[in-house]
Amino acid sequence: MQAGVVIVGAGHAGLQAAASLREQQYSGRIVMIDAEPHPPYERPPLSKGYLLGHTPAARLALRPATFYADRNIELLSGRRATAIDRLRREIILDDSSIVTYERLILATGARNRALAIPGIDLDGVYYLRTLADADVLREQLQPGKDAIVIGAGFIGLEFVACATRLGMRVTVLELASRPMARAVSSGISSVCVDEYQKLGVQLRFNTDIAGILGANGRVVGVQTRGGETFAASLVLVGVGVTPNTELAGASGLMVDNGIVVDQHLRTSDPHISAIGDVAAYRSDHANGSLIRLESIQNASDQARCVAADIVGTPQPYRAVPWFWSDQAHLKLQIAGLALATDQRVMRGQPNGATCAVLHLRAGRLACVETINRPALHLLARRLIASKVALTPEQAADESFELKQLLSA
């Protein structure tokens, strides 16, 4: 069989890579391999509209069923890649079949980080990342029940918003001193805390978990290391993710909290690229640090970058990172990265309605976090890409038109 491009993983990154290759006139064979039994689907609604029953399963599909046949893309769903033979340029699948590649794209994503605590295997303990996870979980969302969320990250808090809306009593237990501590500034965390408290959510920070309590094999509560016990009919664990690097590592590729790639997203083997949640790269937006980003924007932009490299028009990956999350009634959006910034300024009042935090690095705008300010978010992406100079006084002054910096 003809060798071409093989893509392992059919999430946002993998699918966009296949689509971009065809858009950029790649005419060779394209094979997508994915362990999940479903065709590629959207993940963001799983912790929002899909849990609430507002988004039907049919609307989760990233592309219609005809997309793959129309573009001659071979989709192998429910198949797992078990090994890479780099010398022969072959992928070995779980049924011992072999797919030969000219170029290989690893878009293997990440999986939920498991907690190693007593009771983690009880019925009623859930994770939320895949469609299968969401299908099981949403059957348990019933009014009047007690839910415990371990971890106050994006996904955990999005689940909290759904659960409270459906009439559940929710308690959040977080080891850090504030929610989303690794992702947002303390000012934005405070706005989100106020919002969830208004919804009646109990938020407990600086709280370590000793174990999950059960009776007859079913969860009944959570106990902290401080000796407190919280009743629960279900527990959602949301303590971050682990990149799926095992396939790459076993083949001898360089791995460091992700599959390490260069500015063109090539791994230590020039015939293999890595993109999306699993790719670790040095970013100008992180002051040259090796980072790994978990966002649809990053997945899609890296996929386009790799497709361009494969068709012979390589460009270094320089896209401005941006993220978003629905936190109850708040639209949280982030442009840029706050890593290694040296000044931080609040713009507007942190009253839960609209506000922003602007981060500066060496006198330039590096990151903007916004609450319910979509226009400022879009402007911030352009400003960061333009590497505009900005003073703290200008950043804090609502009367100062940031847009004028684009023409300066």
Image: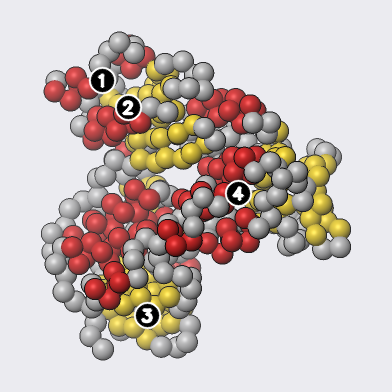
Q: In the rendered view, does 406 fall on the left or right side of 350? A: left
Write down the residue under mark 1: 402
Q: Residues within 10 Å of mark 2 (few under 14, many from 20)?
A: some
Write down the residue under mark 3: 91
Q: Indicate which disc, 4 or 2, sits on the residue closer to the N terminus.
A: 4
Write down the residue under mark 2: 376
Marks 2 & 1, CB-CB < 8 Å contact: yes
Q: Indicate which disc, 2 or 3, sits on the residue closer to the N terminus.
A: 3
Give the secondary structure at mark 2. Answer: helix
Q: CA distance from mark 4 to mark 1?
A: 37 Å
Query: Mark 1: which amino acid?
Result: Leu
Q: Position of residue 362 (x, y in %)?
A: 30, 24
Picture residue at 44% right of the left edge, 62% below the top: 58
Query: Mark 3: which amino acid?
Result: Ile
Between circles 4 and 3, the one closer to the viewer is 4
Give the secondary structure at mark 1. Answer: helix
Q: Is residue 267 above or below residue 323?
A: below
Q: Indicate which disc, 2 or 1, sits on the residue closer to the N terminus.
A: 2
Q: Quadrant of residue 251?
A: bottom left
Q: Position of residue 209 (x, y in %)?
A: 74, 45
Picture residue at 58% right of the left edge, 28% below the top: 195
Between circles 4 and 2, the one closer to the viewer is 2
Q: Indicate which disc, 4 or 3, sits on the residue closer to the N terminus.
A: 3
Write down the residue under mark 4: 238
Q: In the rendered view, does 184 fall on the left or right side of 297? A: right
